[in-house]
Amino acid sequence: MLLDISDPVRPVVIDRVRDENFAFWHSATFTNDAANVVFVDELGGGSAAVCDEATGPERGADAVYSLEGEGDTLSLKFRSYYKLPRHQSETENCVAHNGSLIPVPGADYFVQSWYQGGVSIIDLTDPDHPVEIGFLDRGPWDPSTLRTAGSWSAYYYNGHVYSSGIRRGLDVLRLTDPRLTPAESVTLVEFNPQTQPLLPGG
């Protein structure tokens, strides 16, 4: 639901969307200019292997919507799905999960965890055609049996991505793609994944 909370005592529903491909609307992240929003479908609750050919590219994925209109006429318009562009094995729990924006002024980049699908860097600048520009995939925790493992969250903070692994601990990643270098000029005093501050250049 898209809510008008200008009067916090009496919030008003402006628009709502449904998607037959979504099983569990896990979270939502606005782009820095609030023109688009990424919804995450945690199909299987994070414990199933759904990054496979049988599940397909539209389930257990991200759905990108644009905000159109203004004021009371604001609405959410579907633009595209994004899912890992490679299949994972049947012993790897894998689905869209926690992520955050990478603060590149004038562009929309998103880092996201996929449990045993690893970490994905997504270019959302064209909401109709999101594309992966980098990733980390450690492979299955146990190649013989499906066990819950992998990256539970991936958050960008002051030049690095911090990925909290369920079994392997913390991965600290440095981004070397020149398209992401401008993010290093943005310094955040703190990072709280439950809030979304306006980033410089937004």
Image: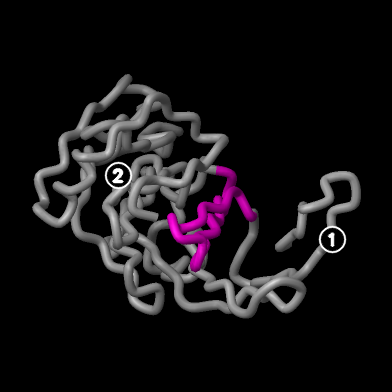
The part of the chain drawn in magenta is 25-45
What residue occupies the far right of the structure in this picture?
Answer: 10
Left or right relative to 185: residue 51: right
Q: Quadrant of the N terminus?
A: bottom right
Residue ID for mark 2: 119
Q: Secondary structure at mark 2?
A: strand
Above-or-below relation of 130 to 60: below
Q: Amino acid at mark 1?
A: Val
Q: Residue sitting at 58 percent across and 49 percent down?
A: 27
Q: Which residue is mark 1?
A: 12
**Hey, what amino acid is under mark 2?**
Val
Instruction: Please identify the quadrant where the C terminus is shown.
Output: bottom left
Q: Quadrant of residue 68?
A: bottom right
Q: Is residue 191 left or right of residue 85?
A: right
Return the disc, 2 or 1, that comes first in the chain's sequence: 1
Q: Tell me what residue is drawn at x 58 percent, y 44 percent.
A: 45
Labels in figure, total: 2
In the structure shown, which secondary structural element does the residue marked by tag 1 occupy?
strand
Q: Residue at x 21, y 43 (%)?
A: 136
Residue 142 visible within the image: no
Q: How far apart, in angstroms, are the residues tagged by discs 2 and 1?
A: 36 Å
